[in-house]
Image (cartoon, grey):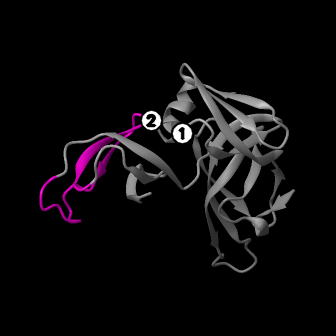
Amino acid sequence: MFTTNDFKKGLIFQADGAPCVLVDVQFQSPSARGANTMVKTRYRNMITGQVFDKTFRSGDKVEEADFERHKGQFLYADGDRGIFMDLENYEQFEMEEDSFANISPYLLDGTEVQLGLFEGRMINVDLPMTVELTVTETPPVMKNATATAETKEAILETGLKIKVPPYLESGERVKVDTRDGRFLSRA
């Protein structure tokens, strides 16, 4: 059990039979004497993705979720689904197409990830902060190209389209931020 004193951003607890992660926590002291401190929270259901706002009173308790993070690996795409393996016990999990479509542009076979397991089943996959991918298609190098604000579109080996500096050529490896799909640097 967690009390409101334990609340901090990123804490995972159970609400309505599902794991939820705290996105925002604010403590409000009362203006009247003898009133309880109010804890305003915003949390996200890790299964459905819905975001909820709820206010707790100081001292309220919430249930701890049966949630674990395991080191995992992306094995392969099976149609529109992704197959992942837990590197601790070699168990394989399947991710359905609606969730997999959001992360598939950053995954190559063998990419290491963090698997989120709730009651023994995989509910989410955390990608590494950056991935290295090869540019497969981009317009030719522009003459006198400098690292200014000019960019051009490039297609990477996974099909991801990003904006890159004009001096990059096809075949080069680049680092991409997985949070927003932004070019970071050459690999």
Rendered view: 30 above or below 183: below
Residue, disc 1: 107
Q: Quadrant of the C terminus?
A: bottom left
Identity of the residue furthest to the left in this view: 143
Mark toward the start of the polypeptide (2 vs 1): 1
Q: Residue at x 39, y 58 (%)?
A: 186
Q: Quadrant of the N terminus?
A: bottom right
Question: Is residue 116 within the magenta segment?
Answer: no
Element on which disc 2 rests: loop
Element on which disc 1 rests: loop
Identity of the residue furthest to the front in this view: 171
Q: Is residue 117 visible?
A: yes
Q: Residue at x 48, y 50 (%)?
A: 132
The segment highlighted magenta reads 142-167
| Mark 1 crowdedness (10 Å alpha carbons): few <14, some 14-19, many ≥20 | many
The three-letter code of the residue at mark 1 reads: Leu
**153 and 2: which one is in front?**
153
Per the model, the C-alpha gap separating discs 2 and 1 is 7 Å
Is the stretch drawn in magenta largely helix, strand or loop? loop
Q: Which mark is residue 23?
A: none
| Residue 149 spot, x, y in % from top left | 21, 62
Q: Which mark is residue 158?
A: 2
Q: Is residue 45 visible?
A: no
* Residues marked 2 and 1 touching at CB (< 8 Å): yes
Question: Is residue 157 within the magenta segment?
Answer: yes
